[in-house]
Amino acid sequence: MSDSRSLSLNDVKPKMKFEGKVTKVELAGARIDIGAEPDAFLHISQIKADRPVTRVADVLKEGDPISVWVKQVKPQQNLIALTMIEPLPLDWNDLQKRMKLIGKVVRVEEFGAFVSIGAPKDGLVPVGQMAKTRVNKPSAVVKEGDEVTVWVTAIKRKENRIGLTMVEPPAVDWSEIKPGQTVTGKVTRLEKFGAFVEFGAEREGMIHVSEISAGYLEHPSEILKVGEEVEAKVLDVDARKKQIRLSIKALEREARVDDEPEAPLLTPMEIAFKQAQRRGRRAGKRTEQVKPDTSRREQEDIFRRTIEQHIPKA
């Protein structure tokens, strides 16, 4: 198996499959040549056999060809750990909410069905998540061995649980809907009090008649029609009550503000002229403030001279 083009530790990744050869049998396991340097190690607990293995030499000998998978790579210890047990396609870290998977029903209970999805634990589809309509008995929908399409709803590693649903989740999750954002959707229903718009969330958004237009409307149908695509602003979201309030008027108001002309840019000559005007006005104000003081001094001087003229000197 070994040649001059040996694999480095960086080339070897967990879950990779190799056709190797036993190079040494030890008490704790066996050394396997998979084309890497040094030989990888297969622990006795990872040997797959028809009976429990107590001695490695009972099932393996030097020169035996062997199919193995990489279980772990430890560069600091210069070690590649192997297993003869085929790893699961998915680890806990691979699972993501809303991930779409194909699984097989392995057990049906009154409260739901367990589905093997190639993860460390079978996922549970509760009876309420088997269809959009009400389901009384899981056995009426699925049976053991059925292949089903599911989506991940919950990953609880500490509790060793995986939640699944057979109902395709909405494109827009509740956590993604925020007040102030703009959504695009289609009008699905018109009522006297407003219009309902579907934009990919679990529930339709509702535009109150007063939020459709700036003017007065007797009925939403005066402006909107079913099937029409509209843009609206999210006003409020209540995930607990499953309510979303939208507004077309708010977007129109913002558009009008954006369309208002901006103040024209001034040329350097115009800027200098305006600055000169401001300086001139400030200088005029300072002159006005000084004048009363000068006039008062003149009046006091005249009063002093008049007194001196009329009062005889001693």
Image (cartoon, helix red, strand yellow):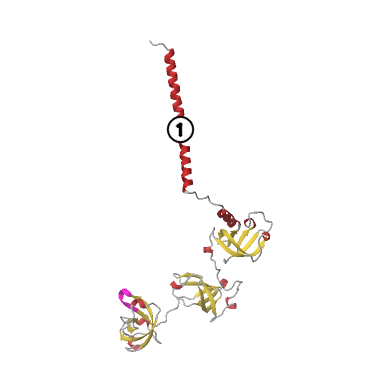
Q: Can you say whether 161 is above or below 28 in the image?
A: above
Q: Nearer the viewer, residue 9 or 276?
A: 276
- Residue 203 showing in the rendered view: no
Q: What is the count of numbered marks?
A: 1
Q: Residue at x 32, y 77 (%)?
A: 79
Rendered-image quadrant of the C terminus: top left
Q: Residue furthest front?
A: 269
Q: Residue at x 65, y 59 (%)?
A: 194
Q: Can you say whether 33 is above or below 120 in the image?
A: below
* Residue assigned mark 1: 287
Type of amino acid under label 1: Thr
Residue range of the region highlighted in magenta in the rendering: 75-80
- Residue 275 showing in the rendered view: yes
Q: What x and y, as percent, mark residue 161?
A: 47, 72
Q: Nearer the viewer, residue 238 or 44?
A: 238
Q: What x and y, as percent, mark residue 138?
A: 57, 76
Q: Residue at x 65, y 57 (%)?
A: 209
Q: What x and y, as percent, mark residue 231?
A: 59, 62
